[in-house]
Amino acid sequence: MQLTVWTYEGPPHVGAMRIATAMTDVHYVLHAPQGDTYADLLFTMIERRGERPPVTYTTFQARDLGGDTADLFQRAAHDAYERFKPAAMLVGASCTGELIQDDPAGLARALGLPIPVIPLELPSYQRKENWGAAETFYRLVRGLAGPHMPAPGTARPARKPGEPARCNILGPTALGFRHRDDVRAVTDLLSRLGVVVNVTAPWQASAADIARLGDADFNVVLYPEIAGQAAQWLKRAFGQPTVATVPIGVGATRDFVTEVARLAGVDPAPVLADAASRLPWYSRSVDSTYLTGKRVFVFGDATHAIAAARIASEELGFKVVGLGTYSHEQARDVREAAARLGLEALITDDYLEVEAACAELQPELVLGTQMERHIAKRLGIPCAVISAPVHVQDFPARYSPQMGFEGANVIFDSWVHPLMMGLEEHLLGMFRDDFEFNDGAGSSHLGHGTKHAAGRPAPVTDAVERAPVVAAMEAPVLVAERPIVLSWAPDAELELKKIPFFVRGKARRNTEKFAGERGISPITVETLYDAKAHFGR
Amino acid sequence: MNAPLLATPVPASGCDAPPILRERGQREVFCGLTGIMWLHRKIQDAFFLIVGSRTCAHLMQSAAGVMIFAEPRFATAIIEEKDLAGLADANAELDAVVERLLARRPEIRMLFLVGSCPSEVIKLDLSRAALRLGQRFAPQVRVLNYSGSGIETTFTQGEDACLTALVPILPEEPAGAQASLLVVGVLADAVEDQFRRLFAAMGITRLAFLPARRAGEMPAVGANTRYLLVQPFLGETARALENRGATRLPAPFPLGAEGTTAWLRAAADAFGVADSVFEAAIAAPRERASKALQHSRRALRGRRIFFFPDSQLEIPIARFLSRELEMELVEVGTPYLHKEHLAADLALLPAGVQLSEGQDVDRQLDRCLAAAPDITVCGLGLANPLEARGLTTKWAIELVFTPIQGFEQAGDLAELFARPLNRRAALEV
Ligand code: SF4
């Protein structure tokens, strides 16, 4: 049993729902109790869909157990077919359905529906949402494109001269983090390269579209955790190569363009030459100097975490101090990326562990999921969201991709905005006792400044001041092993308060480490500055 | 099982009772786990540990809508493959989880082990676990259990199950004790305080609320306890209280000026409060409530409303909307209809109103779209899809998360229905 407060991923059948809901004519019949219908609101509320997900739940009850649940499943599947007339049907069970072992596959087959019925076996007690999405997509692709597979050993027919290359875009789902906009950004990029998109799937694809995936020359996999498995099968079945680079960030987008151009036999130079992203210049402009060496903590799904780490270190000049993922399936890739940065990856789906790591590292910026946004808020650290699990805010009204050159622009803005601007940061360091311009005031451009009314007596009270750091250090829920809390002389405590809040936690930690190692207690002003000199900041 | 899917209206017992459409198809309602959402805030030193699956954990975080900033006083012990395969003794695993949890949260005084569908289906005996852990952590922590599973409970029934679990541990009122009043059901703290003042003004001072805000302050119960329900979904709690000798004061539920007056009067009558005292106590707030309703009545009068089943509050709310705001009831759906507890409210519904119990969501959607009501009360999974079809909706869950009982909240309750209509009228995009 795993003690869980918040979870990064839902159960695997929610992954299956994300596939079915992305598509236009597939229906999912799920053997599940009534409470499981909550999953509908993920789509209708978080993603603001105007349609219900195409899912029928059997909603069996305790009194149905012990006999008639199988019959209930068959009726639900039959009625769903009659009512929705889907082109294909997925059938399966949620965690409770799995336990009652009714065999949805066999029951559905016995109905003899005149459409392809694809059974899903999603082990709820081992696997999670992304795995469920990947498995479902793979089963669908195999089930619907499989019949069009050429005989083994048949070579792919060569493209006629002058005919543009065709590719599939694989992976975007319902409830995906910016999938809607990434599809547009990547389609754009491909069209500028002269590549025709054969099918995008599962996003807005029909069952018939899936059946003709084999017509493309190659596959572009936007989200390996969802489409990686299907792409591998397509490679085996149809000889389609896979573009594995995920175009998040300027460097990765350039690599992507080069890779696609090679497969399509076109010249990438014009697209690469077109300076479509402002990120490189914005990052070089002098106002960005203050970004140098900012300590960032990165956590998310594997694809976004790896991409974020690369952007942070190569394109914004940050220092990545922590990198991790909740995607156990892709742990290897994240470990490799972390090793390249001289780090050990944090692979966990325990939110409390991530919180402890974050509190321990005291980064200046957190790039994470909505969970890390909460952690960061509690620790008083700025944060930008880079990955699912999603929140209603992750479906912005405006076009806001993560991929391609425009995606890099979006990323520059959304990561840099939460930070204090350069000169502002300096002034805050110099005049911290200004009663209107202090830690609590926040940065001017974020509009938090009005939170504390002018005229508040300065200096602010200790309790309020130290809240974030104290919380980080003392709340029992945050840190499994509590750092040793050394005693501070009152004047040193006051001096510590003069350090801007966004580096104060680090200063406190370094000083205590310094003092602890040398057996110094209490910590004095001298110790504080000795430690500062020692750690060289 | 095997009840016909075709729903047929069957007359409810009693000659003037409205006909009830009973349906058994897909239900689109949360399970009882969701009650933890408000219960964990109400009992401030209690913790709710769901013994369930990742689905249960995901439900809890999704139903919250936004993640709660403060550390919640609930969590899920997620059952894993090895627990099912018998490789790990599920009970030993559970004990370890509880130990870890209580070490982290030393301020916890009451722990609820909450059963789920998976724990029920694998027959994990949480009452024995509660007994075992209760002995182990006594006297620091009291350990209780109940089921919030979706195979046994619907949404608000989780609160019923939780309160039912509390009843056996309530202290015993001495046999000769004076009559006392027990108000049963979770209320917002502010509403509780308002009622406390009103009862005090009537001279009813032997008064307590279930649940109390702290585990150590749970009220006593005995043969001289008279209790008032604040919610229509507390059938099992009521039964357990009766077993302890308490007597229910039948009343409509305290929604709206009329409902609140009648609810308070039930207590006043039982405690022999003089009419003049009663009138003096409630005159001012009742007047405020009537005034507060006038504003929304303009938006709501004559409007047609359709209720999908959700919280079991549908019938008293429909009664309030039809009588105090002059709305027209198209269909009033409820997951479960407790005829006895709702008798007073049912009697106040307009003749011939269409009630429905249970659900077949697709059929009900057909009826709703055909009826084209002015406003539809439904769950979060249906609201946007109905809005996209041009209907105006009100999320049912907000009725559970908002203080709506009592005089001072009557205006707010009406406003919850008026706002979507006003909003629709205001928008020109
Ligand atoms: S319906 Fe059952 S399995 Fe689903 S969330 Fe509720 S208790 Fe858990």
Image (spheres, grey):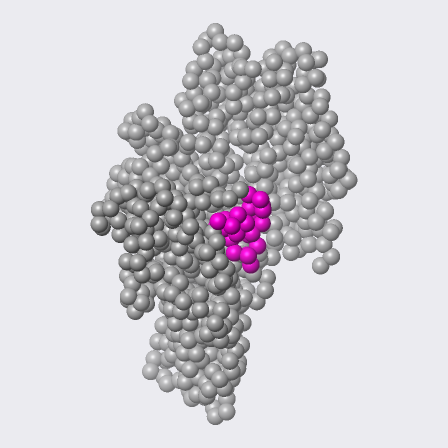
- Asked whether residue A510 is in view, the answer is no
- Which image quarter: residue B188? top right
- Left or right, residue B278 beside residue B226: right
User: In front: A441, or B407?
Assistant: A441
Position of A267 relative to A46 (above/below): below
User: In front: B127, or A514?
Assistant: A514
Q: Residue at image x 70%, y 17%?
A: B280
> Is A384 within the magenta?
no
Position of B270 relative to B52 (above/below): above
Magenta region: A433-456
> Is A451 within the magenta?
yes
Q: Residue at image x 44%, y 40%?
A: A463
Q: Residue furthest top?
A: B176
- Left or right, residue B114 beside residue A178: left
Q: Residue at image x 45%, y 56%?
A: A429
User: In front: B138, or A15?
Assistant: B138
